[in-house]
Structures are given as C-alpha cells and as structure tokens.
Amino acid sequence: MTALRTSGISMRYGSLVALNGVDLEVAAGARHALIGPNGAGKTTLINVLSGAIAPTGGDVYLHDERITMLPQHLRARRGLTRTFQVTQLFPELTVLESIALAILEREGRGWRWWPPVARFEAQLAEAHALMERLGLESDASRRVGRLPYGRQRLVEIALGLAANPRVLLLDEPAAGIPSGESADVLGVVADLPRDVTIVFIEHDMDLVFRFAERVTVLVAGRVLIEGSPDEIARDEHVRAVYLGREA
C-alpha cells in the first residue's frame, strides 16, 4: 500500500529548475530517506509534499487522494505533517506545555490553552504518553529553550506526532546534533509505530544506511536512483556522484 507518491513533480523559479519530473512512491509504514548533494532539491521536494509551496508541474497524492493544490493546514488535518531543518519552537514554554498545546491545536482548541492547564486532563495524559515514547518524560518541566539541541529536536518530533500523522516528513532531524546523540534521535524515529510513515532528509550516510529501509537519491532535481540501502551503497553512480568514491 502506498502512503505518499508524486507524479512528475517539477518546480521552477524562472530559469532555475529545482525539481524536474520527480516520481516518488513511499510505502505505508516505511522509513524512507531522501539523500543527495547540496542543491539536489531535497528540501524543495519536502516543501512541495507538505504544501508549503505549490509545484509548477505534476501531482502529489496522499494515499489515494490528490492533494496537489491542498493548502498546508488541510494536509496536516489529513495526516501529513513535517518538521524543519532548524527547530521552530517556543523556547519559554516547558516541554509538557509545548506538546499539550500542539494536541489542543489539533483539536481546534489551542486558543483555550491559557491560563489554567490542569483542567486539560486528557490532553496532558496524551502529552505524557508522547514524552514517554520519545524519552522526554524527565524534561517535562524544563523550558524548551534550555534543552540541549538534540532534546529540542525530539520535542519538535513530538509536536509533529501530536498531530496524529499518517505521514511524517523530517527535514534533517539530526542536523546540528553532536554525533554521539544523532543516532539516538534517528533511533527514536525509526522505532515509532508502523502506522506512521516516515520520510526524512539526512546527509549522514551512516545514519541513512542504519535506519532507512528505502532510499531515493536526488541529483540536480531529478531522481538518480531509488532502492534499498545496500543497493544504494553498491551503486557506482551514487558512489561517483554523491558518496565521492570512484566507480
């Protein structure tokens, strides 16, 4: 079963071609990585998938529904959410407050958050369950802005999960995290329940080959190859163009 796919996606900015006829198919429950050199079009593709920008050609499908022209907030309501390369958090809120607020936003009640939080028992219980799943329970009362960067990335992933997504798009979830912590973050992502399909951009090939089940390689706005991590690692074109090894 396919969770997310594109057909002939193109994105042009005047004479600049950022994406050129990209066909992508992501299986339901997959851990699917997008890789490629700088300027390959990876973040542009994530922006198109999430609805942040509209493509100049082609279509996007969430399961069987064509969502090409659907705005970002309506895609989120249908279960397609994303995180960003740079965290976008409220630094003065605690971890618990941040996640509970995201849950209330999902329910259309974010405006009722302030001030007394204790009355939202069901939402707080769900927030605690999310924190436990991501190993954030010990940080519940800490302000987000005072957390180490790797923990902030986990909070952002928790906010994405608070929307109850069917598909979660992660733009470099390990970016800026010390190498000793990045595997922990990707491990948490990979261990999420299989009813959440994961598509992620990552530059660290060790992490990609460790956690991805399927890999799509973009070069100059086109799909160069797609396959299993072993197939990608052995492919001579990938080794020459992206991994920097001679074929």
Image (cartoon, helix red, strand yellow):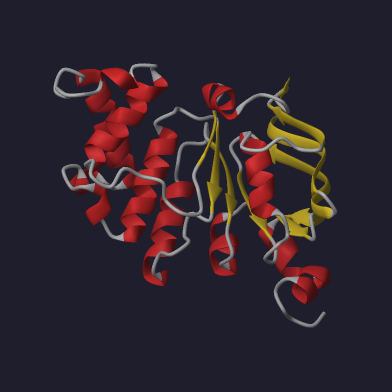
Q: Work out whether 74 lies above or below 51.
A: above
Considering every residue shown, the one lying at the far front of the view is 14
Decide if residue 72 is in sight here.
yes
The residue positioned 81% from the left and 38% from the top of the image is 56
Query: Would residue 1 be found to the left or right of residue 158 on screen?
Result: right
Q: Position of residue 123 (x, y in %)?
A: 27, 23
The residue positioned 31% from the left and 43% from the top of the image is 90
- Which picture quadrant has residue 95? top left
Decide if residue 215 is in sight here.
no
Q: Position of residue 155 (x, y in %)?
A: 34, 45
Query: Would residue 18 be found to the left or right of residue 43 on screen?
Result: right
Observer-nearest of 247 and 14? 14
Quarter of the figure that contains the N terminus: top right
The residue positioned 31% from the left and 20% from the top of the image is 111
Query: Would residue 21 be found to the left or right of residue 121 on screen?
Result: right
Query: Would residue 37 be found to the left or right of residue 115 on screen?
Result: right
- Which picture quadrant has residue 148? bottom left
